[in-house]
């Protein structure tokens, strides 16, 4: 009997390790990735003309990054690797893909969704001003293009990435005006025990933080961001620390509050989702084999819940092994057990990170004239009016009435804040307001439609 | 009457690009067309980097409250769509090439 | 017996099953008449056909039997702000039905001549005029018929707005309350819900859309209802330039530009399963709709499609709805199966249902919609032949 057709979406750490594990067992997969080169976002490879060494780009993770890049390079000759290809829909055992204006269907029996994550975003007055970038975006500017997002940058938000990106900018010679963490120091102290389950990673985090001090960069914790000011572009960040109102002049802001899984394909293929209280996000369910509630659909990496790059590599391999066993290959029980132990340890670390850098509760605290939906400049006050006018209690109805989530980003930027606003306005738990239903295409597509027979 | 956001940008700190080259800055130069005027970029620049090293904004905001300059830089926010040689592309994802014609706004014509 | 324990009992004059536009507008008018009303909707108000359709507010192209109702409904559209507090983004842009070949043009002319007898004024335009007045049209358009009084509106707003207005006057509208059983109870009706609600009513109104056939069957008058899945797409916001709601002979593509600038368009079938309550658009259908939309409006070439959707609509084999009294059971009124073109009719259907419940008759002619046409000697071909432009009835 022939092997099943296997498709993998995403060539980041998870997708690459899944493809590799499958290949080791003599199983070929079609690997579809939106980027021109493998590595995902965390280990994104710059365009060809960039010469600098891996260390300048990935710091302590340079070895891991290079290893992954080598792996995908090797795999590219052995498997059907399709870079620069967007999977924009999935249904009936088929991926709809688009590459260089040409559409193609990829039929599969087994699907691995390894679509990774994006910045978890919260709006702020003034966050649409030119000069404000997502924190991950600020890192990509440096990693992928060798650029800083501005002459004088403020990093604002929370999460381990806040300190890492600031450190990377400082090391590259960029001028940083301040690093402002909305979470207080004691949150990190309380999480130390859990964070110590990955001592090397914890040590790196402490090192990045200390480095900022060495560079003379002001780090403030437990701040309340009030807004970003400027007429036509960023000029100042206003915040409050304790009872003191403060501001810092800058021409760029890197804004981020951790990461959020990209789950649109999992939604379209019919996976059951559950509300994850820790990350306050709806995530597709998966069992210990990495299989979703849809038979034959596996989920690996940050796309199924933020775990970090190391966990993504492990999940990718784990899913590859599950699929290999499903296809009748020799079941590598000891390797699987080892992966599961490491994943459990990493999960403890991840829980520590959520405790150290919890997502601030936004609720209904934003001023009414704050833009909530960036795509169509819909303000908080307008959304509140819509909620009240139509007794809205559920996310999809809120989208229908207020238009939040109807823009080009399809709710990626505003979704979480919109849910929090709805929950606060209607005095419901966040889980009770539901989640936006996925609709194809998962990203805007230029016309004409790809793939007409 | 408040000047249009574009006018403001063209006179204000025009020499200061938004994106600041720090690493691997010395790559081969190339010229392309930005909203009908010649501009310079470097091999390996995305269209967004190319535009934001030539000026401080990408395009007028679709919502009409000023200009935007990209946001997520990873193809998630969908704020950097431009017209390239007649087709649409995300500026943060597409690389600029020599002779490329980039239009950042007003490219939609009814004809 | 359904096995659902009854936790709440209501006794009302009218029970309405189905919270689409027909049910919600009926709830409003019945309540204003002074009757007590309970409406039960299995999901959110207007979340099925009433919310997923194209949004055309159109008299042109309808089966002639529908024209008197559509004219009456158009009058209600004009006073929506008075009636329900919002215009639901109704734009009387005119509806332009296009011909892409000579046969189509001839069909439009025939329809225009016949429709005049129903008081529907249509303006024929030849190639030069249709292009002069609509510079955004593609070369394949050779003429058109303009219904200046038609237009389009936002289907996401209409039903919730009617629901809000109905609640404001005291109608009891229950969402997420699936009806599991409807039956006679002496001279009354008993409606049981999965939530434990049980409603006893003098009159029962069946506005259950694609599920209306189930209720009809429960009262021994099954009908050949089918599920229709529309296939809709929408672009990013674009500068305003498409000045009409647009359709074509044959109905294979239709488009409109909303105030915010997005162009909503569609044509062809998506996929839906009414028992699973699931639906999704079809990539193949979408590709064809795009091709046709680009043929009509070439400027859309540089636009981005940002979303597509489908939904569940109920369709009858003769493409016109079931409206009127039950053929088996007194005080049971049906209004379902609007076959993909019930949006414009929605506001008047509620008025008609109210007339039927309140006075026993409607001032609108309902003969063609009688449920009895599906039984015994009912000849569907006879009904269809009355309107040669049957395809055009779709859009």
Image (cartoon, coloured by chain):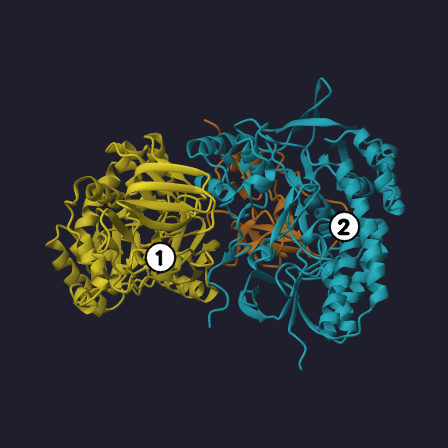
Q: Would you call the spot at circle 2 few (<14 residues within 10 Å), some (14-19), or many (20 or more)?
A: some
Q: Which mark is residue A423?
A: none
Q: Residue furthest top?
A: A243
Q: Is A445 drawn above or below residue C37 in the view shown?
A: below
Tell me whether the residue at label 1 lies in contact with that at label 2, contact meaning CB atoms closer than 8 angstroms: no
| Quadrant of the rendered image containing residue C228 | bottom left
Chain coloured cyan in the rendered structure: A
Q: Position of residue A123 (x, y in %)?
A: 60, 35
> Mark 2, chain letter?
A
Q: Which mark is residue C214?
A: 1
Q: Position of residue C256 (x, y in %)?
A: 35, 51
Viewer-side residue, C333 vs A407: C333
The N terminus of chain A appears in which quarter of the rendering?
bottom right
Q: Position of residue A347 (x, y in %)?
A: 79, 48
Q: Residue furthest left?
A: C117
Chain coloured orange in the rendered structure: B
Say which colour chain C has.
yellow
What is the C-alpha distance between the residues marked 1 and 2? Answer: 51 Å
Mark 1 vs mark 2: tell me if same chain. Answer: no
Seen in the image, is B2 located left or right of residue A85? left
* Residue at (23% x, 33% y) in the render: C33
Seen in the image, is A182 located left or right of residue C186? right
Viewer-side residue, B9 vs C362: C362
Viewer-side residue, B79 vs C358: C358
Q: Is B75 drawn above or below residue A161 in the view shown?
A: below
Where does label 2 land, which residue? A308
Residue C289 seen in render: yes
């Amino acid at each position: 009997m022939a092997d099943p057709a296997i498709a993998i979406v995403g060539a980041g750490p998870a997708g690459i390790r899944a493809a590799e594990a499958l290949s080791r067992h003599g199983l070929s997969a079609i690997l579809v990735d939106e980027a021109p080169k493998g590595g995902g976002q965390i280990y994104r490879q710059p365009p060809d003309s960039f010469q600098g060494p891996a260390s300048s780009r990935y710091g302590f993770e340079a070895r891991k990054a290079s290893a992954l890049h080598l792996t995908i390079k090797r795999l590219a000759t052995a498997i059907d690797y399709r870079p620069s290809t967007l999977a924009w829909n999935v249904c009936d055992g088929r991926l709809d893909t688009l590459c260089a204006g040409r559409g193609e269907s990829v039929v599969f029996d087994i699907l691995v969704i390894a679509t990774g994550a994006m910045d978890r975003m919260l709006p702020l007055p003034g966050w649409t001003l030119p000069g404000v970038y997502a924190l991950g975006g600020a890192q990509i500017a440096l990693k992928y293009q060798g650029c800083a997002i501005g002459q004088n940058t403020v990093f604002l938000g929370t999460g381990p990435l806040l300190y890492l990106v600031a450190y990377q900018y400082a090391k590259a010679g960029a001028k940083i005006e301040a690093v402002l963490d909305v979470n207080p120091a004691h949150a990190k102290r309380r999480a130390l025990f859990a964070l110590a389950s990955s001592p090397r990673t914890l040590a790196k985090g402490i090192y990045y933080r200390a480095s900022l001090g060495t560079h003379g960069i002001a780090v403030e914790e437990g701040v309340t961001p009030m807004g970003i000011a400027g007429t036509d572009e960023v000029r100042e960040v206003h915040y409050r620390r304790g009872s003191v109102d403060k501001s810092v002049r800058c021409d760029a802001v890197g804004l981020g509050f951790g990461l959020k899984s990209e789950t649109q394909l999992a939604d379209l293929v019919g996976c059951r989702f559950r509300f994850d209280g820790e990350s306050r996000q709806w995530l597709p369910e998966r069992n210990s084999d990495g299989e979703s509630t849809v038979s034959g659909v596996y989920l690996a990496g940050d796309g199924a819940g933020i775990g970090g790059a190391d966990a993504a590599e492990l999940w990718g391999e784990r899913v590859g092994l599950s699929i290999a066993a499903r296809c009748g290959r020799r079941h590598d029980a000891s390797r699987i057990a080892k992966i599961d132990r490491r994943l459990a340890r990493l999960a403890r670390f991840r829980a520590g990170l959520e405790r150290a850098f919890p997502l601030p509760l936004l609720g209904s605290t934003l001023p009414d004239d704050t833009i909530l939906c960036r795509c169509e400049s819909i303000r908080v006050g307008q959304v509140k009016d819509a909620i009240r006018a139509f007794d809205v209690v559920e996310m999809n109805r809120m989208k229908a009435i207020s238009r939040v989530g109807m823009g080009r980003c399809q709710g990626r930027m505003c979704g979480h804040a919109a849910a929090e606003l709805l929950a606060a306005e209607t005095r419901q738990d966040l889980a009770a307001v539901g989640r936006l239903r996925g609709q194809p295409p998962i990203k805007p597509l230029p016309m004409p439609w790809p793939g007409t027979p | 009457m408040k000047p249009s956001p574009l006018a403001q940008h063209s006179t204000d700190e025009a020499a200061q690009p938004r994106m600041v080259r720090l690493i691997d800055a010395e790559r081969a130069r190339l010229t392309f067309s930005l909203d009908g005027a010649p501009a310079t970029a470097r091999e390996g620049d995305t269209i967004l980097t190319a535009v934001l090293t030539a000026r401080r904004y990408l395009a007028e905001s679709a919502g009409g409250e000023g200009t935007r300059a990209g946001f997520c830089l990873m193809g998630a926010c969908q704020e950097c769509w431009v017209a390239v040689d007649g087709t649409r592309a995300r500026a943060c994802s597409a690389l600029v090439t020599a002779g490329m014609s980039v239009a950042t706004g007003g490219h939609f014509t009814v004809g | 017996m359904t096995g659902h324990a009854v936790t709440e009992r209501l006794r009302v004059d009218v029970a309405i099953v189905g919270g689409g536009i027909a049910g919600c507008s009926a709830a409003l008018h019945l309540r204003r008449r002074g009757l007590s009303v309970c409406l039960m909707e299995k999901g959110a108000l207007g979340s099925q056909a009433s919310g997923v359709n194209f949004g055309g507010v159109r008299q042109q192209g309808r089966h002639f039997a529908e024209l008197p109702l559509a004219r009456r409904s158009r009058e209600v559209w004009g006073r929506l702000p008075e009636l329900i507090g919002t215009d639901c983004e109704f734009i009387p842009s005119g509806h332009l039905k296009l011909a892409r070949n000579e046969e189509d043009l001839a069909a439009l002319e025939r329809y225009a001549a016949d429709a005049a007898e129903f008081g529907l004024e249509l303006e024929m335009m030849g190639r030069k005029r249709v292009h002069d007045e609509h510079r955004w049209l593609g070369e394949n358009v050779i003429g058109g018929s303009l219904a200046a009084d038609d237009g389009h509106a936002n289907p996401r707003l209409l039903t919730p707005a009617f629901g809000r207005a109905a609640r404001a006057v005291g109608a009891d509208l229950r969402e997420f309350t699936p009806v599991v059983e409807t039956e006679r109870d002496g001279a009354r009706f008993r409606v049981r819900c999965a939530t434990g609600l049980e409603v006893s009513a003098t009159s029962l109104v069946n506005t259950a859309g694609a599920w209306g056939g189930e209720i009809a069957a429960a009262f021994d008058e099954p009908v050949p209802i089918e599920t229709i899945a529309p296939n809709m797409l929408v672009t990013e916001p674009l500068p305003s330039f498409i000045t009409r709601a647009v359709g074509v002979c044959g109905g294979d593509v239709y488009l409109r530009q909303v105030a915010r600038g997005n162009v909503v368009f569609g044509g062809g079938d998506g996929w839906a399963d009414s028992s699973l309550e699931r639906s999704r658009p079809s990539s193949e259908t979408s590709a064809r709709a795009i091709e046709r939309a680009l043929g009509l409006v070439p400027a859309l070439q540089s636009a981005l499609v940002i979303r597509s959707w489908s939904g569940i609509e109920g369709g009858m084999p003769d493409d016109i709805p079931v409206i009127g009294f039950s053929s088996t059971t007194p005080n049971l009124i049906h209004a379902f199966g609007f076959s993909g073109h019930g949006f414009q009719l929605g506001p008047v259907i509620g008025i008609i249902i109210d007339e039927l419940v309140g006075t026993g008759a409607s001032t609108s002619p309902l003969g063609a919609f009688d449920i009895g046409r599906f039984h015994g000697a009912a000849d569907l071909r006879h009904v269809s032949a009355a309107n040669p432009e049957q395809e055009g009835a779709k859009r």
